[in-house]
Amino acid sequence: FRGKERLFLAEGPQAVREAAGYGQTLVELFATVEAAERYADIVGAAREAGARVHLAAEAVIEDISTTVTPQGLVGVCRFLDTPFEQILAARPKLVAVLAHVRDPGNAGTVLRCADAAGAEAVVLTDASVDLYNPKAVRASVGSLFHLPVAVGVPVERAVAGLREAGVRVLAADGAGEHDLDSELDAGTMGGPTAWVFGNEAWGLPEETRALADAVLRVPIHGKAESLNLATAAAVCLYASARAQRAATGCRSVTDA
């Protein structure tokens, strides 16, 4: 039904606030009386954005919510994915590509990491999870509304298109022939970069690794067997962000 109507749900004050501030994305808002009073600023922003606001009983919110403890606000939003060609035309400098990522929590968390690292786009391949899965939306903590996301792009097309746009494509894989530290030391990560992250269970298949300009592993300096997908993505994206900002310094989130 999400795909048919091209509508999805955004639950909780953070997601609804971000949706209200993103163009004409927010269509409707359902709120309990208590939540409408507590988050009056969000309700006001929803109305200013042109959304229809409905007061609803707690039982109604519980029925339409997918969280265990609903926070009293549920927004109905239009799909907001961006055509892949539009992302390429913007000549992005940092992109995360999710290839065959099936866990919605991981997808949303990587999207959040990409947003935090200053990436300019995220691409989900045609075999990846639905971007608008409620768990993915929640895990993005509003970042879904911050940067362009393309969906349903074949991995071969994603890699070829990014390379044509002047972006170096790096595959993140635990069996990579080079490690991230060595690449940083070599000073080769300052240019436009796309990171390809694979499936949680089996990583990237050989044919996908072969498409990349290089396959890098995150070095394990301690005794941990490995890093999970979202953690590895955060490390890789921040490494690129740091290398790209080396000349001008790196802004901390505490500077605001």
Image (tube, helix red, strand yellow):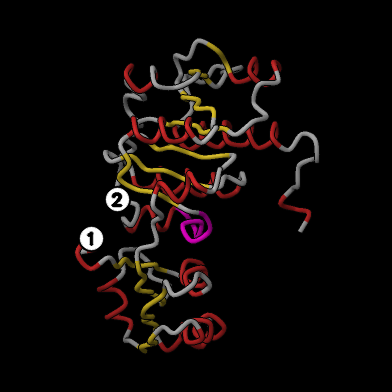
Q: How many marks?
A: 2
Q: Is residue 105 one of those drawn in magenta?
A: no
Q: Give residue 196's position: percent from left, percent from top.
A: 44, 31
Left or right: residue 238 compared with residue 213? right
Q: Residue at horizontal 69%, vertical 35%?
A: 244
In the rendered view, tell whether residue 157 sits above or below residue 182.
Answer: below
In this rendered view, identify the residue nearer to me: 124 or 169. 169
Identify the residue under disc 2: 130
Callout 2, which amino acid? Asp
* Residue type, label 1: Gly
Q: Secondary structure at mark 2?
A: loop
Q: Nearer the viewer, mark 1 or mark 2?
A: 1
Whether tag 1 and tag 2 are in contact, CB under 8 A, the answer is: yes
Q: Secondary structure at mark 1?
A: helix
Region of the chain picked out in magenta, as a range:
140-147
Q: CA distance from mark 1 to mark 2?
A: 9 Å
Where residue 114 appears, as percent x and y from the top left, is: 54, 44
Q: Is residue 49 above or below residue 99?
A: below
* The one of 164 and 153 positioned closer to us in this rendering: 164
20 left or right of 243 in image? left
Q: Residue 146 magenta-drawn?
A: yes
Q: Nearer the viewer, residue 122 or 105?
A: 122
**Residue 7 spot, x, y in % from top left:** 29, 68
Question: Where the N terminus falls, by quadrant?
Answer: bottom left
Quadrant for the C terminus in the image? bottom right
Q: Which residue is mark 1?
A: 3
Residue at the spot x=36%, y=70% of the render? 77
